[in-house]
Image (tube, rainbow, N blue to C red):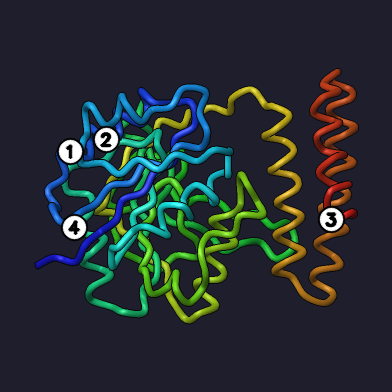
Amino acid sequence: MKPLVSIITVNFNQTEVTISLLKSLREVTYKNIEVFVVDNASKESPNIKIKEQFPEVNVILSKVNLGFAGGNNLAIEQAKGKYMMFLNNDTEVKPDFLEPLVEVMEKDNHVGICSSKLIFYAHPDTIQFAGSSPLHPIKIQSFAVGYGQKDSEKYSQTVETALAHGAAMLVRSEAISKAGKMPEEYFLYYEEIDWCERIKKEGFKIMFVPDSVVLHKESISIGKQSFIQVFYKTRNRILLARKWRKGNEKIISLAYLSATVFRDILKYFTQRKNDLARASWKALLWNIQN
């Protein structure tokens, strides 16, 4: 029998979007699965609506919004799979997306994470993710291989990659046992990068598997920035540097990131986006105080 795969997604005020994902999961050809939906204290509980249409799905209701990592961790505690498939709720999967991921895992016990090829839902011939560059030691940034490019043979090789994409990644349960669950201190953004680094530190590899295709509804264009987005992206980028950089590299990185915060504050003020300037300042202040 094929190994059990636990599929996990987190919902927050997007029940209909999550239901679209569940409909696509109904069509998967890999049959030994269990599915978990964690609701992060949505205004309206999705439990009844999901259970009516998908009685086989395990719905976990959190009384508070635990963030991306905290929500996933609730399901990790209950999941029984040899592998755990983490999917953003705004994705839809190809019917055969799981087999290639499991096959790579089964062939090499040193593989801790397999990342799917992500395609923009609204642009089904355009890549969002086909692997990742390493995290820059100073700027604490990486870039997605193939981003915005037309899908082609160039992006069709199974290769080791530096980081996985949190929207669609299969993780070995043994790797989670050794590295720990998702880091919850980030709440939103950068948590999967920290997790990838921890799992690699335990001796596991990360692979990009192009035969596993997942459609992501994230826009190809940059949407309107919000206070929450700017705050957590800025805060967590600095936090990641604090956790993973050492010695002179850490000093240089933190100096660089602090300078970018002041640059952004000035930019937002000149654009009369005072709330975003305040978000940047609060992000820097949080790191000073914590």
**4 and 3 marks in contact (CB < 8 Å):** no
As drawn, the residue found furthest toward the left would be 1
Compared to 111, does 276 lie above or below?
A: above
Name the residue rendered at 74%, 57% in the picture. Answer: 239
**CB-based contact (under 8 Å), mark 1 and mark 4:** no
* 3D distance between C-alphas at marks 1 and 3: 47 Å
**Separation of disc 2 and disc 1 at Cα?**
6 Å
Q: Residue at 69% across / 57% down in the picture? A: 140
Give the Cα distance between marks 4 and 2.
18 Å
Estimate the x, y position of residue 264 in percent, counting from the top left: 83, 36
Residue 22 is tagged as: 2
Can residue 123 be seen at all in this image of the molecule? Answer: no
Q: Is residue 228 above or below residue 103?
A: above
Kind of residue at disc 4: Glu
Q: Residue at x 29, y 56 (%)?
A: 6
Q: Nearer the viewer, residue 240 or 145?
A: 240
Which mark is in front, 1 or 4? Answer: 1
Residues packed near mark 4 inside 10 Å, few (<14), some (14 to 19) or many (20 plus) = some
Nearer the observer: mark 1 or 3; the answer is 1
Q: Earlier in the sequence, mark 1 or mark 3?
A: 1
Task: Calculate the distance from the C-alpha at mark 1 to the C-alpha at mark 4.
Answer: 15 Å
Residue 261 point in image, percent of width and height: 84, 43
